[in-house]
Amino acid sequence: MDRLREKDEEFIWHPYTHINSKPAAIPIVKGKNAILYDENGNKYIDGISSWWVNIHGHGNKYIARKIYAQAKKLEQVIFTAFTHEPAVELAEKLLSVLPGNFSKIFYTDDGSTATEVAIKLSLQYWKNVGDKRKKVLAFHNSYHGDTFGAMSVSERGIYTAAFEDKLFDVIFIDTPDGKNIESLKAEVEKYKSEFACFIYEPLLQGAEGMKMYNADGLNSLLVYLKNERIICIADEVLTGFYRTGKFFAGDHLETKADIICLSKALTGGTMALGVTACTEQIFAEFVSDDKTKTLFHGHSFTANPLACVAAIASFELIQKKEFIKGVENVISHHQHFSKKLQRLEKKNYIKNVRQIGTIIAFEICTADKDDYLNNVSKSFSPFCLRKGVYLRSMGNTIYIMPPYCITSRELKKIYSVVVDFIEYHLKENAF
Ligand SMILES: *Cc1c(COP(=O)(O)O)cnc(C)c1O
């Protein structure tokens, strides 16, 4: 029974895991919709969509059949000289729905490589144009991935501390709060003709604590930056595919990005795939007889056919009525739950209750600093697991981000476990 756990301990290094305090990893043998089953038959409701990727639930047969059929035909082919139907069909479909005037799709492997390409595209664009713009602008509390370029444009903190001196310089500004727009513009103004690009997670900063910010403010900032010819890169790796209640977070904004990055829910949470889309204006600067203007970037599995068919299948499921009903169901239950949370907020047990679309978040009030190392994270996940729910806090930030197929009953179960945790631990004075 413990064979897998032991071998796992022996052979495997898990992501974002403090080795000395980690409980043994739980072997999961199958998943169905919002439920994960372990090898002993225990069930866990997947309250964070398996790290934010899974939107249709686990074990989706429709997507599985498409992947199987494609695997029998063509599992992979080098994407330089060759192309294939899944890559072309997916690109065309995406271009028809993306929020902006995008004309080309560049395929990558995941969210980090999607943002890497976006940054490389922007910097090389200005080089190809023959302009000296080199500076990069980003938001405080941003997260754009774990590779070096992606880390460079992310908040400097615990995730990046060990590599600090190897990261390139970026100018960070606050997110708009509805009042600070003039001071944000003033900060950009100083170097405005030196900025190559601005990268941002629209409306929701995920990995730095599910921070939500003002759409009107972002819109004014984008208008200003675009006017200064700064390339605006929307990192929608997390916010895409109805996380914020609309297809893309960019659909809440009037001003559209020049480059957009997608991954996570792109394949419905089944296969690793990333996308970087850009406008014709950007692409045009890479079209030249001069070979040095080429984008020298690619991955072995660029446009993997299995990942592309999975994304197409997910896309087809998104068009169905049940899909939108699922999204609306999560949103309305969250709204109801946030009222309950607000009562706990009044008692100062928790703070900053907030919701955007299918994500609800808040912080537990503790004597500790509000950061990733806060003690809440040690007890929260194990507490929930014992009660049949999988949630993972980021420090004392607790959030719920379920697959949209989750039932009302399952959602209520998650909420009750969260409330139990807040009440039980405050009574015990655990923090
Ligand atoms: C998760 C995430 C990434 C990185 O994606 P990976 O697939 O984990 O490399 C980049 N940007 C945002 C906004 C993310 O949430």
Image (spheres, grey):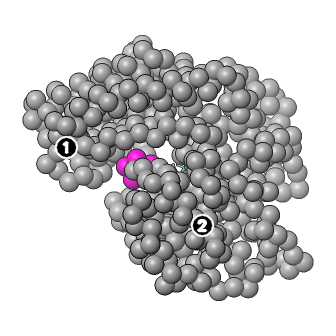
Instruction: Tell me where residue 426 sits by quadrant.
Output: top left
Quick check: 333 left or right of 196? Answer: left
Q: Is residue 71 above or below residue 410?
A: below
Q: Residue at (48%, 17%) from the top-left corner?
A: 407
What is the span of residues highlighted in magenta in the rendered image?
205-210
**Which quadrant would the C terminus be assigned to in this image?**
top left
Element type at marker 1? Answer: loop
Q: Position of residue 50 (x, y in %)?
A: 49, 34
Residue 25 visible from this viewpoint: no
Q: Position of residue 310 (x, y in %)?
A: 71, 34
Quick check: 38 left or right of 225? Answer: left
User: Which amino acid does the dot numbered 1 rest on?
Assistant: Cys
Q: In this figure, which residue is indicated by the disc labeled 2?
A: 223
Q: CA distance from mark 2 to mark 1?
A: 37 Å
Instruction: Tell me where residue 255 sits by quadrant.
Output: bottom right
Q: In this figure, which residue is indicated by the disc labeled 1?
A: 365
Sequence-first disc among 2 and 1: 2
